[in-house]
Amino acid sequence: MPMFHVSKYFLRSICLLLQLLLVLSGFANYASATTADDIQKQLDEKQQQIRELQEQAQSYKENIDTTQQQANTLKNLIANYNRSIQSLEKQINKDRQAITLLSDKITQTELQIHALERSIERNKEQTAALVREIYASDSESILELVLKYENLSNFYDQVQNQDSLNSNLYENLKNLKSEKAGLENAKLELNQRQDDLNNAKDDLTAQQAIVESQRADQQDVLKQTRNQEAQYQNLLKDVTSKQDEVQRQIFELEDRLRETLDPSIIPTTGHGVLEWPASGRLSQGYGCTAFAKKSKAYPTCFHNGIDIAGPIGTPLRAAREGVVIGVASAPYAYGKWITIEHDNGLVTLYGHMSVQTAKVGQTVKRGDIIGYMGSTGYSTGSHVHFTVYAPNTYTTKASKLAGTLPIGASLNPMDYLPK
């Protein structure tokens, strides 16, 4: 490193830099290297436990997916409830392990941050000491330095020491800058993990609510039927009749809206305008489907959306950024449902939810979780009914029989979803 002279103006700049660096705050926790190693070992063990739980949960999901059908006997219905509860409980156990794992990673990151902050403090102290030494040397003139020493050898040694101080100061400043950047990155990672932890806790709360809802529904059916098949068949017949009546009302109202729909207000179609609202299997398409042909609910063959089947508790996500304009329930139709109005005028409907987490008036981004898949309302298994309404056609209708019904002129969702 070549020799250079440090002026008092430069030293003042260094002092100002040090004052700025002092803004960095510290954590109060202390931990040894052994503690960090222990945490890493715990993380590895929990990762393995999560993998095992994931395999078990996936096994239950596949079993439900292959046997998902209308529970046309009381025995089948109770069996479906039990399978759903078992699957959810496995998922809950996995989520609990994931939350513990995230908490441990947060602790690990906090330890790393603390170590960085201690390193920065040490580096600042060393740099401050170097600045003081350089300042003391800089206050003496060349003549004073020459007269101060008995021979030139001692004078040259002092000059070399000055150069060494300058080099050390330069390296310390580089280290401070690098450590500060590392600290900022560690804090960003910590914030992200804390966000992930909060999301995982929200998912866990929702899964627990779904389990309790499934158990309550199971007990309600057993109470109404007194565990007798004949009484269950009578109940099923009555419910099916009401469901068909509500579906006819929806079809007739929406059919009139479709007839008056102005094509000029329909947004340009395109794959990717909307995102898929859930992961799963496309179990029914839009329009004249095999199910619609067999159903007594439709005067003509028509299904006003698409159905995506998946395990109960599957997260449901906003198909595009927008504002939540409806959160309600229609027991003999869409069950628990949510509608979102998007920036291009389209309105999307998400039906048969087990839990609704979004609220009316809430602004959501594309991909935000708004609730969880279920089988509420007119449903033969866990799925989401996804409808896309044309702009300026969405409304709701209050029904004594079916609660609040979303109504609108529907469009084919497949024209807007990714291939």
Image (tube, rainbow, N blue to C red):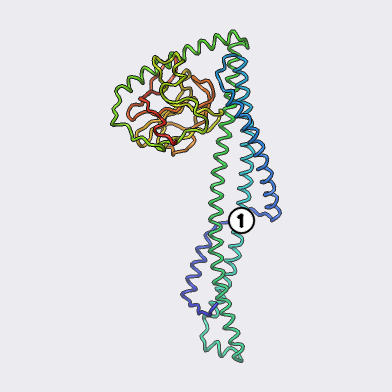
Looking at the rendered image, the quarter that the C terminus falls into is top left
Residue 305 higher or lower than 115, as above or below: above
Q: Which residue is mark 1?
A: 114
Could you say which quadrant of the image residue 150 lies in? bottom right
Q: Residue at x 40, y 37 (%)?
A: 273
Q: With respect to residue 116, does 355 lie above or below? A: above
Q: Residue at left 57%, top 14%? A: 72
Type of the residue with mark 1: His
Q: Residue furthest bottom?
A: 151
Q: Is residue 292 visible?
A: yes
Residue at (67, 37) in percent of width and height = 52
Per the image, label 1 sits on a secondary structure element best described as: helix
Residue 69 appears left or right of 41:
left
Q: Position of residue 349 (x, y in %)?
A: 43, 28
Instruction: Give coordinates of residue 120: x percent, y percent.
Output: 58, 62
User: Could you tell me which quadrant the N terminus lies in?
Assistant: bottom right
Depth check: give the residue in front, 268 or 397.
268
Residue 118, how many percent across, how many down?
A: 61, 60
Expressed as whole percent of the image width and height from the top left, the position of residue 144 reads 54, 88
Q: Is residue 321 visible?
A: no
Residue nearest the observer in this picture, 409 or 194: 409
Instruction: Please give left or right for residue 339 compared with residue 201 in the image.
Output: left
For disc 1, the neighbor class at 10 Å (few under 14, some 14 to 19, many from 20) is many
Q: How many marks?
A: 1
Task: Judge by depth and name the residue closer to the eye, 31 or 223.
Answer: 223
